Image: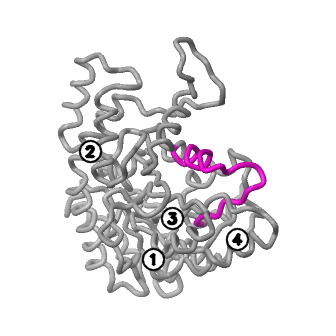
Amino acid sequence: MTRDRIYLSPPHLGGTELDHIKEAFEANFIAPMGPQLAGFEQAFCDLTGFAHCVAVSSGTAAMHLALRLHGVGRGDVVIASTLTFIGSVTPATFLGADVHFVDCDRATWNMDPALLVEAIAEVEASGRRVGAVIPTDLYGQCADYDALRAICEPRAIPLIIDAAESVGATYKGRPSGRGGDAAIYSFNGNKIITTGGGGLLAGDDGEFIAEARRLSQQARDDAPHYEHSTIGYNYRMSNVAAAIGLGQLAMLERFVDRLREISAWYETALSDLPSVEFMPEAPYGRSNRWLTIMLMEPEVFGATPEDVRLALEAENIEARPVWKPMHLQPVFAGCTRTGGGVSEDLFRRGLCLPSGSALTETDLERIAAVIRGVAR
Protein backbone atom coordinates (compact mmCIF):
# COMPACT_ATOMS: atom_id res chain seq x y z
CA MET A 1 0.00 0.00 0.00
CA THR A 2 1.40 3.39 -1.04
CA ARG A 3 1.83 5.77 1.87
CA ASP A 4 0.66 9.36 1.65
CA ARG A 5 3.09 11.57 -0.23
CA ILE A 6 5.23 14.00 1.72
CA TYR A 7 5.97 17.03 -0.42
CA LEU A 8 9.01 19.28 -0.26
CA SER A 9 7.20 22.53 0.62
CA PRO A 10 3.45 22.43 0.00
CA PRO A 11 1.02 25.26 0.71
CA HIS A 12 -0.30 25.40 4.29
CA LEU A 13 -3.65 27.13 4.64
CA GLY A 14 -4.14 28.94 7.92
CA GLY A 15 -7.92 29.01 8.12
CA THR A 16 -8.97 32.56 7.15
CA GLU A 17 -8.12 32.47 3.44
CA LEU A 18 -11.67 31.42 2.52
CA ASP A 19 -13.12 34.26 4.61
CA HIS A 20 -11.18 36.83 2.59
CA ILE A 21 -12.06 35.11 -0.68
CA LYS A 22 -15.73 35.07 0.33
CA GLU A 23 -15.60 38.81 1.00
CA ALA A 24 -14.18 39.37 -2.48
CA PHE A 25 -16.86 37.20 -4.10
CA GLU A 26 -19.72 38.72 -2.16
CA ALA A 27 -18.61 42.22 -3.17
CA ASN A 28 -18.05 41.07 -6.78
CA PHE A 29 -14.39 42.11 -6.68
CA ILE A 30 -13.19 39.33 -8.97
CA ALA A 31 -11.50 41.80 -11.31
CA PRO A 32 -7.75 42.36 -11.01
CA MET A 33 -8.09 45.21 -8.49
CA GLY A 34 -10.11 45.53 -5.31
CA PRO A 35 -9.97 46.04 -1.54
CA GLN A 36 -8.27 42.73 -0.84
CA LEU A 37 -5.40 43.65 -3.17
CA ALA A 38 -5.05 47.08 -1.59
CA GLY A 39 -5.22 45.50 1.86
CA PHE A 40 -2.58 42.94 1.01
CA GLU A 41 -0.19 45.60 -0.29
CA GLN A 42 -0.70 47.71 2.85
CA ALA A 43 -0.24 44.68 5.11
CA PHE A 44 3.04 43.93 3.36
CA CYS A 45 4.19 47.52 3.85
CA ASP A 46 3.40 47.09 7.54
CA LEU A 47 5.34 43.81 7.65
CA THR A 48 8.47 45.00 5.85
CA GLY A 49 8.61 48.66 6.80
CA PHE A 50 8.72 49.77 3.16
CA ALA A 51 6.62 52.81 2.38
CA HIS A 52 5.19 51.43 -0.86
CA CYS A 53 4.42 48.02 -2.37
CA VAL A 54 2.89 46.78 -5.60
CA ALA A 55 1.68 43.18 -5.84
CA VAL A 56 2.28 41.44 -9.18
CA SER A 57 1.96 38.06 -10.85
CA SER A 58 5.35 36.64 -9.80
CA GLY A 59 8.67 37.43 -8.20
CA THR A 60 10.19 37.35 -11.68
CA ALA A 61 7.73 40.03 -12.84
CA ALA A 62 8.67 42.14 -9.81
CA MET A 63 12.36 41.81 -10.64
CA HIS A 64 11.71 42.71 -14.28
CA LEU A 65 9.96 45.93 -13.23
CA ALA A 66 12.68 46.78 -10.70
CA LEU A 67 15.49 46.38 -13.21
CA ARG A 68 13.68 48.29 -15.95
CA LEU A 69 12.90 51.20 -13.64
CA HIS A 70 16.52 51.33 -12.51
CA GLY A 71 17.54 51.83 -16.13
CA VAL A 72 19.05 48.42 -16.87
CA GLY A 73 19.32 47.92 -20.61
CA ARG A 74 21.25 46.51 -23.51
CA GLY A 75 24.99 46.45 -22.97
CA ASP A 76 24.75 46.65 -19.19
CA VAL A 77 25.96 43.94 -16.82
CA VAL A 78 23.84 42.83 -13.87
CA ILE A 79 25.82 41.17 -11.08
CA ALA A 80 23.87 38.42 -9.32
CA SER A 81 24.23 35.50 -6.95
CA THR A 82 25.09 32.31 -8.78
CA LEU A 83 23.47 30.07 -6.15
CA THR A 84 19.85 30.98 -6.83
CA PHE A 85 16.70 30.16 -8.75
CA ILE A 86 16.80 31.24 -12.37
CA GLY A 87 13.75 33.49 -12.04
CA SER A 88 15.76 36.08 -10.14
CA VAL A 89 18.24 36.63 -12.97
CA THR A 90 16.37 36.05 -16.24
CA PRO A 91 14.73 39.52 -16.13
CA ALA A 92 18.16 41.02 -16.79
CA THR A 93 18.25 39.11 -20.06
CA PHE A 94 14.72 40.32 -20.93
CA LEU A 95 16.19 43.83 -20.97
CA GLY A 96 19.21 42.90 -23.09
CA ALA A 97 21.74 42.95 -20.25
CA ASP A 98 24.35 40.30 -19.51
CA VAL A 99 24.69 38.62 -16.12
CA HIS A 100 27.93 38.24 -14.19
CA PHE A 101 27.63 35.70 -11.40
CA VAL A 102 29.20 35.92 -7.95
CA ASP A 103 29.85 33.02 -5.60
CA CYS A 104 28.56 32.70 -2.04
CA ASP A 105 30.58 32.45 1.16
CA ARG A 106 30.57 29.36 3.37
CA ALA A 107 29.40 31.21 6.46
CA THR A 108 26.02 32.29 5.05
CA TRP A 109 25.69 30.66 1.58
CA ASN A 110 24.84 34.13 0.26
CA MET A 111 26.70 36.56 -2.01
CA ASP A 112 30.27 37.05 -0.81
CA PRO A 113 30.88 40.83 -0.40
CA ALA A 114 34.62 40.48 -1.04
CA LEU A 115 33.92 38.74 -4.34
CA LEU A 116 31.37 41.42 -5.24
CA VAL A 117 34.14 44.03 -5.05
CA GLU A 118 36.24 41.92 -7.43
CA ALA A 119 33.29 41.41 -9.77
CA ILE A 120 32.54 45.13 -10.03
CA ALA A 121 36.19 45.89 -10.72
CA GLU A 122 36.29 43.23 -13.44
CA VAL A 123 33.16 44.50 -15.17
CA GLU A 124 34.24 48.14 -14.99
CA ALA A 125 37.72 47.24 -16.27
CA SER A 126 36.06 45.81 -19.37
CA GLY A 127 34.50 49.21 -20.02
CA ARG A 128 30.95 48.16 -19.23
CA ARG A 129 28.40 49.56 -16.78
CA VAL A 130 27.11 47.61 -13.78
CA GLY A 131 23.36 48.15 -14.06
CA ALA A 132 22.42 46.56 -10.75
CA VAL A 133 23.49 44.06 -8.11
CA ILE A 134 21.05 41.29 -7.12
CA PRO A 135 21.89 39.28 -4.01
CA THR A 136 19.56 36.34 -3.27
CA ASP A 137 18.42 35.59 0.27
CA LEU A 138 19.10 31.88 -0.03
CA TYR A 139 16.67 29.37 1.47
CA GLY A 140 15.26 31.98 3.82
CA GLN A 141 18.51 33.54 5.06
CA CYS A 142 19.17 37.23 4.40
CA ALA A 143 22.33 38.28 2.61
CA ASP A 144 24.63 40.73 4.40
CA TYR A 145 22.73 43.81 3.24
CA ASP A 146 24.86 46.42 5.00
CA ALA A 147 28.12 45.04 3.64
CA LEU A 148 26.71 44.87 0.12
CA ARG A 149 25.19 48.34 0.33
CA ALA A 150 28.51 49.80 1.52
CA ILE A 151 30.00 48.51 -1.74
CA CYS A 152 27.19 49.57 -4.09
CA GLU A 153 26.13 52.95 -2.69
CA PRO A 154 29.39 54.87 -3.28
CA ARG A 155 29.37 53.60 -6.85
CA ALA A 156 25.70 54.54 -7.40
CA ILE A 157 24.88 50.93 -8.28
CA PRO A 158 21.28 49.92 -7.49
CA LEU A 159 21.04 47.11 -4.93
CA ILE A 160 17.91 45.05 -5.54
CA ILE A 161 17.31 42.39 -2.90
CA ASP A 162 15.92 39.07 -4.10
CA ALA A 163 13.92 38.27 -0.96
CA ALA A 164 11.73 35.72 -2.76
CA GLU A 165 12.67 32.99 -0.27
CA SER A 166 13.02 35.06 2.90
CA VAL A 167 9.60 36.44 3.82
CA GLY A 168 9.47 36.48 7.62
CA ALA A 169 13.25 36.40 8.08
CA THR A 170 15.17 39.28 9.66
CA TYR A 171 18.52 41.01 9.20
CA LYS A 172 19.90 42.82 12.25
CA GLY A 173 16.32 43.05 13.48
CA ARG A 174 15.04 44.48 10.19
CA PRO A 175 12.55 42.59 7.99
CA SER A 176 13.97 40.72 5.00
CA GLY A 177 14.56 42.88 1.95
CA ARG A 178 14.98 46.04 4.04
CA GLY A 179 18.45 47.07 3.01
CA GLY A 180 18.45 47.69 -0.72
CA ASP A 181 17.07 50.28 -3.09
CA ALA A 182 14.18 47.90 -3.70
CA ALA A 183 13.22 44.35 -2.81
CA ILE A 184 11.21 41.65 -4.53
CA TYR A 185 9.23 38.86 -2.89
CA SER A 186 7.57 35.68 -4.13
CA PHE A 187 4.31 33.99 -3.15
CA ASN A 188 4.67 30.94 -5.37
CA GLY A 189 2.86 27.82 -4.23
CA ASN A 190 5.95 26.40 -2.52
CA LYS A 191 6.95 29.54 -0.58
CA ILE A 192 6.45 30.10 3.15
CA ILE A 193 3.27 32.04 2.35
CA THR A 194 1.47 31.80 -0.97
CA THR A 195 -1.14 33.52 -3.06
CA GLY A 196 -1.26 30.51 -5.36
CA GLY A 197 1.29 32.33 -7.50
CA GLY A 198 2.40 35.93 -7.23
CA GLY A 199 5.09 38.38 -6.25
CA LEU A 200 5.62 41.89 -4.93
CA LEU A 201 7.94 44.83 -5.48
CA ALA A 202 8.65 47.05 -2.47
CA GLY A 203 10.47 50.35 -2.07
CA ASP A 204 10.42 53.71 -0.31
CA ASP A 205 10.24 55.86 -3.46
CA GLY A 206 6.57 56.53 -4.14
CA GLU A 207 7.14 57.61 -7.75
CA PHE A 208 9.16 54.44 -8.42
CA ILE A 209 6.38 52.14 -7.15
CA ALA A 210 3.67 54.21 -8.87
CA GLU A 211 5.45 53.78 -12.21
CA ALA A 212 5.92 50.06 -11.51
CA ARG A 213 2.18 49.84 -10.88
CA ARG A 214 1.44 51.64 -14.16
CA LEU A 215 3.79 49.40 -16.12
CA SER A 216 2.24 46.31 -14.53
CA GLN A 217 -1.17 47.42 -15.90
CA GLN A 218 -0.15 47.70 -19.57
CA ALA A 219 1.22 51.24 -19.02
CA ARG A 220 -2.08 52.92 -19.69
CA ASP A 221 -1.77 56.70 -19.72
CA ASP A 222 -4.08 59.04 -17.84
CA ALA A 223 -6.83 59.41 -20.42
CA PRO A 224 -10.50 58.34 -20.73
CA HIS A 225 -9.60 56.13 -23.69
CA TYR A 226 -6.79 53.56 -23.85
CA GLU A 227 -3.70 55.64 -24.53
CA HIS A 228 -0.20 54.14 -24.37
CA SER A 229 3.07 56.03 -24.73
CA THR A 230 5.31 53.19 -23.57
CA ILE A 231 5.21 49.40 -23.52
CA GLY A 232 3.85 47.83 -20.34
CA TYR A 233 2.95 44.36 -19.11
CA ASN A 234 0.04 42.36 -17.78
CA TYR A 235 1.71 41.76 -14.42
CA ARG A 236 -0.86 42.71 -11.78
CA MET A 237 -1.85 40.28 -9.04
CA SER A 238 -5.56 39.46 -8.97
CA ASN A 239 -7.78 40.55 -6.11
CA VAL A 240 -8.71 36.93 -5.36
CA ALA A 241 -5.05 35.89 -5.15
CA ALA A 242 -4.44 38.79 -2.77
CA ALA A 243 -7.35 37.58 -0.62
CA ILE A 244 -5.48 34.29 -0.16
CA GLY A 245 -2.39 36.29 0.73
CA LEU A 246 -4.21 38.19 3.50
CA GLY A 247 -5.08 34.90 5.18
CA GLN A 248 -1.54 33.63 4.77
CA LEU A 249 0.07 36.77 6.22
CA ALA A 250 -1.88 36.27 9.41
CA MET A 251 -0.12 32.91 9.82
CA LEU A 252 3.41 34.00 8.85
CA GLU A 253 4.91 34.20 12.34
CA ARG A 254 3.51 30.78 13.22
CA PHE A 255 4.87 29.32 9.96
CA VAL A 256 8.37 30.72 10.62
CA ASP A 257 8.40 29.32 14.15
CA ARG A 258 7.34 25.90 12.89
CA LEU A 259 9.91 25.81 10.08
CA ARG A 260 12.63 26.69 12.56
CA GLU A 261 11.42 23.85 14.80
CA ILE A 262 11.55 21.44 11.86
CA SER A 263 15.08 22.50 10.94
CA ALA A 264 16.23 22.07 14.53
CA TRP A 265 14.55 18.64 14.65
CA TYR A 266 16.47 17.47 11.58
CA GLU A 267 19.77 18.69 13.02
CA THR A 268 19.17 16.88 16.30
CA ALA A 269 18.02 13.69 14.59
CA LEU A 270 20.63 13.44 11.84
CA SER A 271 23.80 15.32 12.83
CA ASP A 272 25.37 12.15 14.22
CA LEU A 273 25.44 10.58 10.75
CA PRO A 274 28.89 10.56 9.11
CA SER A 275 29.87 13.88 7.50
CA VAL A 276 26.37 15.37 7.80
CA GLU A 277 26.12 19.15 8.17
CA PHE A 278 23.30 21.66 7.87
CA MET A 279 23.06 25.18 6.48
CA PRO A 280 24.55 27.56 9.06
CA GLU A 281 22.60 30.52 10.38
CA ALA A 282 24.28 33.90 9.92
CA PRO A 283 25.02 35.66 13.22
CA TYR A 284 23.45 38.89 11.95
CA GLY A 285 19.95 37.53 11.34
CA ARG A 286 17.16 35.07 11.88
CA SER A 287 16.41 32.78 8.94
CA ASN A 288 12.86 31.67 8.22
CA ARG A 289 14.31 28.22 7.39
CA TRP A 290 12.09 28.01 4.32
CA LEU A 291 13.91 24.81 3.39
CA THR A 292 16.23 22.68 5.53
CA ILE A 293 19.40 21.78 3.65
CA MET A 294 21.53 18.77 4.57
CA LEU A 295 25.10 18.38 3.35
CA MET A 296 26.96 15.08 3.14
CA GLU A 297 30.34 13.93 1.86
CA PRO A 298 29.41 10.94 -0.33
CA GLU A 299 32.63 9.00 0.31
CA VAL A 300 32.12 9.27 4.06
CA PHE A 301 28.33 9.17 4.25
CA GLY A 302 28.21 6.09 2.02
CA ALA A 303 25.80 7.55 -0.53
CA THR A 304 25.37 10.61 -2.73
CA PRO A 305 22.62 13.20 -2.26
CA GLU A 306 20.98 11.70 -5.35
CA ASP A 307 21.04 8.25 -3.74
CA VAL A 308 19.28 9.71 -0.71
CA ARG A 309 16.78 11.56 -2.89
CA LEU A 310 15.91 8.40 -4.79
CA ALA A 311 15.56 6.41 -1.55
CA LEU A 312 13.14 9.03 -0.26
CA GLU A 313 11.25 9.06 -3.57
CA ALA A 314 10.87 5.27 -3.35
CA GLU A 315 9.00 5.91 -0.08
CA ASN A 316 6.84 8.62 -1.70
CA ILE A 317 8.79 11.46 -0.11
CA GLU A 318 9.87 14.47 -2.17
CA ALA A 319 13.34 15.96 -1.75
CA ARG A 320 15.33 18.13 -4.14
CA PRO A 321 18.96 18.95 -4.98
CA VAL A 322 20.38 22.30 -3.92
CA TRP A 323 20.00 24.96 -6.61
CA LYS A 324 22.34 24.25 -9.48
CA PRO A 325 24.59 27.34 -9.73
CA MET A 326 23.61 29.64 -12.57
CA HIS A 327 27.14 29.67 -14.02
CA LEU A 328 26.78 25.90 -14.61
CA GLN A 329 23.44 26.22 -16.42
CA PRO A 330 23.53 25.53 -20.17
CA VAL A 331 21.55 28.70 -20.87
CA PHE A 332 24.36 30.75 -19.30
CA ALA A 333 27.23 28.92 -20.96
CA GLY A 334 30.07 31.34 -21.51
CA CYS A 335 28.91 33.81 -18.89
CA THR A 336 31.43 35.64 -16.72
CA ARG A 337 31.72 34.93 -13.02
CA THR A 338 33.74 35.62 -9.92
CA GLY A 339 34.40 32.52 -7.85
CA GLY A 340 32.13 29.50 -8.05
CA GLY A 341 33.84 26.81 -6.01
CA VAL A 342 31.70 27.20 -2.89
CA SER A 343 28.38 27.03 -4.71
CA GLU A 344 29.58 24.09 -6.79
CA ASP A 345 30.54 22.25 -3.60
CA LEU A 346 27.15 22.93 -1.99
CA PHE A 347 25.40 21.69 -5.14
CA ARG A 348 27.52 18.53 -5.08
CA ARG A 349 26.92 17.73 -1.41
CA GLY A 350 23.50 19.24 -0.67
CA LEU A 351 19.95 17.99 -0.49
CA CYS A 352 16.79 19.97 0.36
CA LEU A 353 14.68 18.00 2.83
CA PRO A 354 10.88 18.18 3.13
CA SER A 355 10.16 21.35 5.07
CA GLY A 356 6.44 22.08 4.92
CA SER A 357 5.13 23.87 7.99
CA ALA A 358 2.37 21.26 8.36
CA LEU A 359 4.79 18.34 8.78
CA THR A 360 4.02 16.17 11.81
CA GLU A 361 6.40 14.36 14.14
CA THR A 362 5.38 11.12 12.43
CA ASP A 363 6.28 12.59 9.03
CA LEU A 364 9.70 13.72 10.28
CA GLU A 365 10.45 10.33 11.82
CA ARG A 366 9.47 8.63 8.56
CA ILE A 367 11.87 10.91 6.60
CA ALA A 368 14.72 10.45 9.05
CA ALA A 369 14.34 6.66 9.02
CA VAL A 370 14.85 6.58 5.26
CA ILE A 371 17.94 8.79 5.45
CA ARG A 372 19.40 6.69 8.25
CA GLY A 373 18.78 3.57 6.20
CA VAL A 374 20.87 4.92 3.34
CA ALA A 375 23.80 6.15 5.46
CA ARG A 376 26.86 3.99 5.99
Label placed on residue 321: 3
Residue 53 is a magenta residue: no
Residue 249 seen from this side:
yes
Label placed on residue 280: none
Is the residue marked by circle 1 packed among few (<14), some (14-19), or many (20+) residues within 10 Å?
Answer: many
Identify the residue position indicated by label 1 in the image.
108
Disc 1 or 4, which lies upstream in sequence?
1
Q: Position of residue 248 (x, y in %)?
A: 26, 44
Frontmost of labels 3 and 4 is 4
Circle 3: element type: strand
Disc 3 or 2, which lies upstream in sequence?
2
Circle 2: element type: helix
Amino acid residing under circle 4: Arg
In whole angstroms, how far apart are the C-alphas of marks 1 and 4?
Answer: 19 Å
Disc 2 or 1, which lies upstream in sequence?
1
In whole angstroms, how far apart are the C-alphas of marks 2 and 1?
Answer: 28 Å
Label placed on residue 337: 4
Amino acid residing under circle 3: Pro
- Is 342 above or below relative to 258? below
In whole angstroms, how far apart are the C-alphas of marks 1 and 3?
Answer: 18 Å
Identify the residue position indicated by label 2 in the image.
248
Q: Residue furthest right?
A: 126
Marks 1 and 4: CB-CB under 8 Å? no
Marks 3 and 4: CB-CB under 8 Å? no
